[in-house]
Each structure stands twice: as C-alpha cells, then as structure tokens.
Image: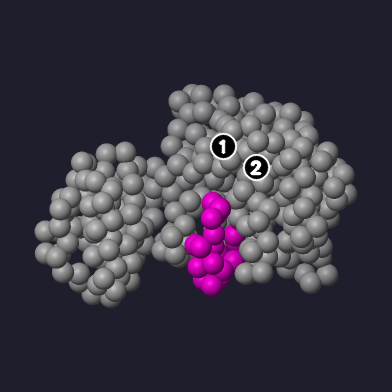
Amino acid sequence: MLVVMQSHATEEQVREVCKRIESLGLKAHPIPGSARTAIGITGNDGAVDLGVLESMPGVIECIPVSKPYKLVSRDAKAEDTIVRIPTGSGDVIIGGQHVALVGGPCAVESEAQVMAIAERIAQAGVRLFRGGAYKPRTSPYSFQGLGEPGLQILAKARKNFGLGIVTEAIDHESLDLVEQYADVIQIGARNMQNFSLLKRAGHAKKPILLKRGMSATLDEFLMAAEYILSEGNYNVILCERGVRTFADHSRNTLDLTIVPAVKRRSHLPIVVDPSHGTGVRHKVLPLSRAAVAVGADGLLVEVHHQPEKALSDGMQSILPDEFAQLTEEVRQIAALLHRTVN
C-alpha cells in the first residue's frame, strides 16, 4: 500500500499519517520526492482501511502496490534514488545522471599494497576505493582476509588520498566493524539471501552495496533489497556481478540485460562489476564500456599493481594503467549519454 501526499503537505501532516499507520500495527516508510512525499506501508497481511487514511489532511489517495517488493518499486517512487557517498574531496553521487567509478584490489593484503594501488586510483581521478578486509572463499584454505587490521589499512588509505571506502561484511560481527570504518557496506553474492544479515544492514547508517546472487532472478534480487529498505535503510545500491551459466569462456556470465530491467522496475541505482562478471582481465575493459553504454550507474573494478602476486583474484584484476584507460573511455561514453562520471 502507498499513501500519496499532496505537493503542499506539511511535515506535520506527513508525521501524523505515519503515526496513524503505526497505530494500526503497520510500518510507515516516508519516501520524499521532488514534487511530493509518498508513504509506503509494510506489515499488512490483508487490506488496509483506505477510508481512515484518505480522510486525513494532506493525503491525495492510497494506492495498492501489487508487486511483492513494495519499497524498491517504481510504484513507490517514480524518481531515481540518488545515493551520496562522502569522500575527502566531496560527495560521490550514484544514480540519476551520475556514474560512479570504484577501483581497488579484491583483497587487502598489506599496507604497502593498498597504498600503492590507492595512489594510482586517486591519480586516475576516481574517489571510491574497494578492497576486502573479509573474504568469503570457496576453499577454507584460501586467503580469508586480514579482518580488522585490514579495515584499519583502508581507513589510512581514506585519510591519505581522500577516498571513500567500499568493503564487504560477511556476518553480523564483521558488519558491526565495517560500519565503523567504511563509507559503503558491501553485501556479497553469497550473502544476497542471508536474510538475517540483510535485516541488520537495514539498520546500518551507511549505504549498502548489494551484489546479485550467482543464480538469482531479478525478482529475487529486488526482494533481497526490499529486506534492507523494509528495516529503514533506503540508501541501497544494486550490483550485477555475473551469474552462473553453462558458458565456459568466462568465470561467470555478466548479465547486462538486468540493468535496463532494474531501471524499469525499481528506482534504486545499479552498478556493474565486470571483474567478477568475467574473471578474465582482457574482458574487463570492453564490458565496462558496454555496462556504461547500457545505463549502469557505476562500475566496481578490481585493480592490482602486481596481479601475478595477488592473494585473491589476480587473474581478473587489471593494471593501474589499464584502469586509467578505462576511466577515460568511460567518461567519453557517459558524455554521449549526457551523464557525468564522478
């Protein structure tokens, strides 16, 4: 259910409608727009008495939402959601006419490694840095990340180069720590349907970057995002990172068709990870170009200055010079689409 407020409705009127919704044992989600505010209602198993709400001051109408994902749908919010990420050199904007670039290694391996790569990322004019302090791996014998010492290294990179930090949380305990250190909390593909973790992310005060599961449908992907929004965190960025198919020429199949599909159904921004999506270094640049051309709101790219020595995913990490080339080419493509890269 969606309650649409009048364009001149006051903040007090919005609060009163929210109070009335809560008094019915339901949850209210105010969704501000450029013209008017809408209030999403969740927690109702059956029909809501529309007359009670439609008669309140400031309300235009109540609209049933047929889709299972209520808050992430275009029905709830027609305009694109804009997510702002603070960095030492101003906010990075994701969504709308803005395209964001994120670069860095798969894993935080050492302070020297992170500082060397962070310097090159900053030199390329990119202000968001990715790197995993926690690494969920298929094998228990693979490098699992440095944990909190890795987060401290990322914090130092932020301070030294003015970068915003994007890093993954893998469980409740790590999310508590990541929230202290990071600017964006990543939920990886393996945890896309870890509903307990999604609910905890919904209480975080930082934006969430939610990766698509390796076999997730579009509806399953959007329902995972709905878990986060339903708990009160509306700053969610979706991420396509490839799905498992029969193809054997790449690690995964990067599904760029999901970008326009998401934009048709949801107001949330969606970025693309061509590194995990292909698993092959020489495919990262061409698919980065394609992702921006098809409408992605950003790119999440793995960069390593010594990929042959990387402890995680060296085969898919591009070199800093290739990343600089990627940023230049992406800026040109974005300009043709009347978009700005930041």
Q: Tell me: residue 165, above or below residue 47.
A: above
Tell whether label 1 touches label 2 (CB within 8 Å).
yes
Secondary structure beneath dot 1 equals strand
Q: Residue at x 24, y 58 (%)?
A: 16
Label 1 sits on what residue type?
Val
Q: Residue at x 64, y 64 (%)?
A: 176
Instruction: Name the disc covering residue 92, or none.
Output: 1
Horizontally, residue 320 falls left or right of residue 288, namely right
Task: Indicate the quadrant containing the C terminus: top left, top right, bottom left or bottom right.
Answer: top right
**Mark 2 crowd level (few <14, some 14–19, many ≥20, 10 Å Cα):** many
Does the stretch in magenta take in 170?
A: no
Label 2 sits on what residue type?
Gly
Image coords of residue 187 (percent x, y): 59, 60
Q: What residue would you read off at disc 2?
A: 164
Q: Residue at x 77, y 53 (%)?
A: 152
**Mark 1 crowd level (few <14, some 14–19, many ≥20, 10 Å Cα):** many
Looking at this view, is 60 or 190 the one in front?
Answer: 60
